[in-house]
Amino acid sequence: MIIYPAIDLRGGRVVRLTEGKFDQEKSYGDDPLAVAREFAAAGATWLHVVDLDGAKDPTKRQTALVEKIARGSGLRVQTGGGIRDEAQIEALLAAGAERVIVGSLAAREPARVRDWLARFGAEQIILSPDVRLDADGTPRVAAAGWQESTGLALDDLLNGYLPAGLIHILCTDISRDGKLTGPNTALYSQLVKRFPSLQIQASGGVSSLDDLRGLQTTGSAGAIVGRALYEKKFTLQEALAC
């Protein structure tokens, strides 16, 4: 399982939001490149970067900063945040990103995103279905920065992409994000069993090394770790070692 330390960018700073809410922000520094280099020095190989400004307003994308991090850290970078068109994907790949994360559009315009998979390749595109569990426990996909529900069941979304060659998904349980309450291991275990051809990254709630060990037992291909690192619940070296 690959550990992906996370950097969320807002106004050039490193921040974390709770449940994606912009009014619940905590800042963790003004030098994202220095943070990325610290992760690299600790042994990380990948970095997860979210452009919160770009997610909110595509005219304020921080592509130049993403490029600075990708080229200056020595880490392989997957990045996204409000991706809406091919030009944004092209710009991020040209900036040195290895994978571009597509979120809301994957549910809203699946035909368009399937075309992107064909054009850019399944290794360059990672779908990011963010979910809330309904009353029956069915994960349903949210959109618009988690503020809206599409009503679409996660399984239906993924089944629609399998014929297009989808490989990578990053699934966040919104109710766990930024809260340090532990990841939804049952969700990821079920996903791995139902979709064995997919490389599934787990996101949301990691607060301890035991959480990471639990995710590893689900068969998840990766785990996003953010706030727990910044608040020193454990070190990145410890996470990589476990």
Image (spheres, rainbow, N blue to C red):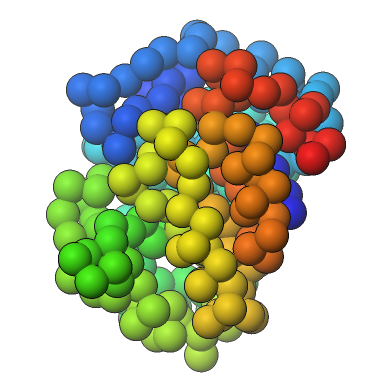
Locate the N terminus by quadrant.
Answer: bottom right
Locate the C terminus by quadrant.
Answer: top right
Please name whichever residue, 225 or 116, is drawn nearer the observer in this view of the structure. 225
* Whether residue 203 is situated above or below residue 42 in the rendered picture: below
| Residue at (25% x, 37% y) in the render | 56
Q: Is residue 219 left or right of residue 7?
A: right
| Residue at (58% x, 78% y) in the render | 193
Q: Is residue 18 left or right of residue 180?
A: left
Percent of width and height locating residue 233: 60, 21
Q: Is residue 43 visible?
A: yes
| Residue at (61% x, 16% y) in the render | 232
| Residue at (46% x, 53% y) in the render | 184
* Whether residue 130 is situated above or below residue 54 in the rendered picture: below
Percent of width and height locating residue 68: 62, 26
Percent of width and height locating residue 221: 67, 60
* Whether residue 172 is situated above or below residue 188 in the rendered picture: above
Please name whichever residue, 235 or 129, is drawn nearer the observer in this view of the structure. 235
Percent of width and height locating residue 96: 66, 43
